[in-house]
Image: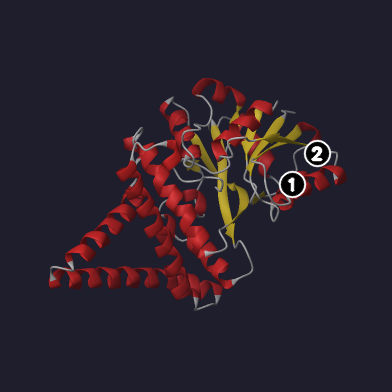
Amino acid sequence: MTFVSIIIPCYNEQATIRLLLDAIYHQTYPRSDMEVIIADGFSTDQTRQEIAKFQDAYPALAVRIVDNHKRTIPSGLNRALEASRGDIIIRLDAHSTPALTYVERCVSGLQTGLGENVGGVWDIQPGSHRWISVVIAAAAAHPLGVGDALYRLNSQPGEVDTVPFGAYRRETFERVGRWDENLLTNEDYELNTRIRQSGGKIWLDPAIRSIYFARPTLSALARQYWRYGFWKWRMLRRYPKTLRPRQALPPLFVLSLIILAVLSFFCTQAAWVLLLEICLYLAILIAGSISTARQRGDWRLAFGVPLAIATMHISWGSGFLASMLTSPGQRSDLPSAKEN
C-alpha cells in the first residue's frame, strides 16, 4: 500500500479542524499508511489545543504540527511538504472535510495515470447557521458567481485547468517545483499551470468529493475575493495565456462603474447609462437566482444570492484593478493572505 501524506495549511481554524481530522480518521484508506502534517501559522485561538485533543483521543492516526513562520498558505504547504514522507501528497484545507473515500479515490486516480494532479469537486456548505451564510454558500456554487470553475459545479470527469485540494506524486514536485511563496493566493492554480506547461494533466473526478465551508459573512467574503483578484493579476503577469473570460469580466465591470460614475458629474447621459447598467446587472443576477430559490424552497434567496454574487464580482474586480495599479508593489504593501 502506498504511503500518503496529507498536508494542511492552518491558521485559527478551531471551529473546523476537528471536523477535518475526524473525516481523515474515518477514511477507507488504511490509517497505518497515512500521516497528517498540519502547518500552523501560530494560531491565536484554540486550534492547537483541538489538534492535541484529537492526537490524545486517536493515536492510531499519525498527526504532526509544524510551524509556519511566514503565516501564508504557500509557505505552510511547503513546510508541511518538507516534513512529510509519503510517496503521494494530498493537499487539504483546515475548513474542509473530505468524503470517506477521498484518499482512496485520489490514490487510485494517480496510480491509474489519470493525471499528475487528481482532485474532485466541492460540496459548498454554509460557514455558520445564519441565513447570510446560507446565501453565501449558494452564491459560491452558482454559475453566475464562479463561471466555468468546474470543481464548484457538478461536472463530468476530465482534464481541467485546476482542481482544489489536489493529490500529487512526490516526484512531481521534484520535477516542476513546489508552491510559489511569492503568490499569497492562486498558489494552486500557478502550480497546476507549471504542471500543464511541463506536459502533465490535471484531472477532475467528480466522485472525489469534499465539503468546503464558505465564508460566514459578506465582509469575510469580500476580503476573500479581493485577495483572489489581487493575486490573480500577479499570477497573470507570468502566465497571461491562462486568463479566462470569466476572470476578465469582474475588473471590466468595476472599471465601467468607476468611469461612468466619474463621467456622471459632467454628463447626464453617463448617469443614465450607469443606472441602466446597474439595473440590467441586478436583473440578470435575480433572474439567475430564481432557480436556486425554487430548488431550496426559500424565495429570499432570489434577492440574497444576487447580493453575495455582486460582493464576489465587485471585490474580485477591485482587487484585480488595485493589483494592476500597484504592480509590481513592495512586499509590505501586499495584503494579508492568512485565510484561503
Image position of 166 (left or right of 331): right
Give the answer, above or below, for where 13 lies relative to 303: above
Q: Is residue 250 left or right of residue 43?
A: left
> Looking at the image, which residue is at 62% across and 50% down?
210
* SS type, badge 2: loop
Question: Nearer the N terminus, badge 2 or badge 1?
Answer: 1
Residue 253 placement: quadrant: bottom left
Is residue 176 rendered to the left or right of residue 51? left
Would you say residue 316 is visible in this rendering?
yes
What residue is pinned by disc 2?
A: 61
* Residue 285 image offset from top left, x and y in percent: 38, 68
Q: Residue 279: give x, y in percent of width and height.
A: 29, 73
Q: With respect to residue 296, does 59 lie above or below?
A: above
The residue singled out by tag 1 in the image is: 21
Q: Residues within 10 Å of mark 2 (few under 14, many from 20)?
A: many
Point out residue 55 in the picture as x, y percentages from the top left corner.
Answer: 82, 42
Dot 1 falls on a residue whose secondary structure is helix
Dot 2 and dot 1 residues touching (CB under 8 Å): yes
Q: Residue at x 75, y 34 (%)?
A: 34
**Quadrant that contains the N terminus:** top right
Question: Residue visible at 65% across and 50% down?
Answer: 12
- Give the amino acid at mark 1: Leu
Asked if residue 161 can be seen in this view, the reply is no
